[in-house]
Image (cartoon, rainbow, N blue to C red):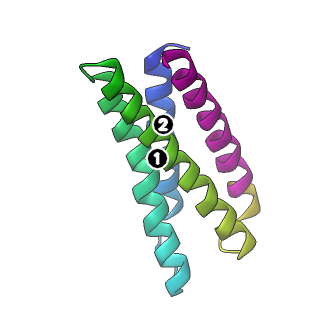
Amino acid sequence: MPDYDLADRLEDFAASIIKMYDVMPKSYAAQYLAQQLIRSSCSTALNYGEALGAGTTRDQLNKLRITLKELRECLRNLNIQSKAKLIDVNIFDKLRNENDQLIRIVVTIIKNKS
């Protein structure tokens, strides 16, 4: 898969998270998790962009690992929100599936570059 496809997918994933919270949830827990999910999902796209511009393979791998870490954080956050019934199951399934695919892609890129 070309790099631009992954960059677009990461940006689309972050945008989907942002759109999901057009209206901020009312409870403290829901607000906290929503804000954290927005930060971590946006971080995936931003760090991947940094990886594309990295000057060395070592720096690129470091940024890719940060991207992976943030994707895994998104997954945990989505799981918590689902278990606490803070997120619609249909939205959850779609986002979780995309999140899982993105994790697999980034892991494969890291393995191939290591």
Position of 105 compared to 7: left or right? right
Residue reaching furthest to the top: 2
| 112 magenta-colored | yes
Q: Taken as a whole, is the magenta stretch helix, strand or loop?
A: helix
Above or below, 18 against 69 in this view is below
Picture disc at residue 10? 2
- The residue carrying pointer 1 sits among few (fewer than 14), some (14 to 19) or many (20 or more) residues within 10 Å by Cα, namely many
Residue drawn at the location 75% of the way across and 56% of the way down: 90
- Give the camera-side residue of 25 and 82: 82
Q: Where is residue 9 in the image (x, y as percent from the top left)?
A: 51, 32
Q: Is residue 41 above or below residue 63?
A: below
Span highlighted in magenta in the image: 92-114
Q: Where is residue 57 in the image (x, y as percent from the top left)?
A: 35, 19
Label 2, label 1: how many angstroms apart (C-alpha)?
6 Å
Depicted 59 relative to depicted 39: above or below:
above
**Outermost residue toward the bottom?**
27
What amino acid is labelled 2 in the image?
Leu
Can residue 22 be seen by looking at this rendering?
Answer: no
Which residue corresponds to mark 1? 14
Residue at image point 49% right, 60% down: 37
**As shown in the figure, which amino acid type bears the numbered disc 1?**
Ala
Quarter the N terminus occupies = top right
- Which quadrant of the structure image shows residue 8? top left
**Which class describes the residues within 10 Å of circle 2: few (<14), some (14-19), or many (20+)?**
many
Q: Does the magenta stretch include residue 10?
A: no
Picture quadrant where residue 67 is located: top left
* 32 w.r.t. 93: above or below: below
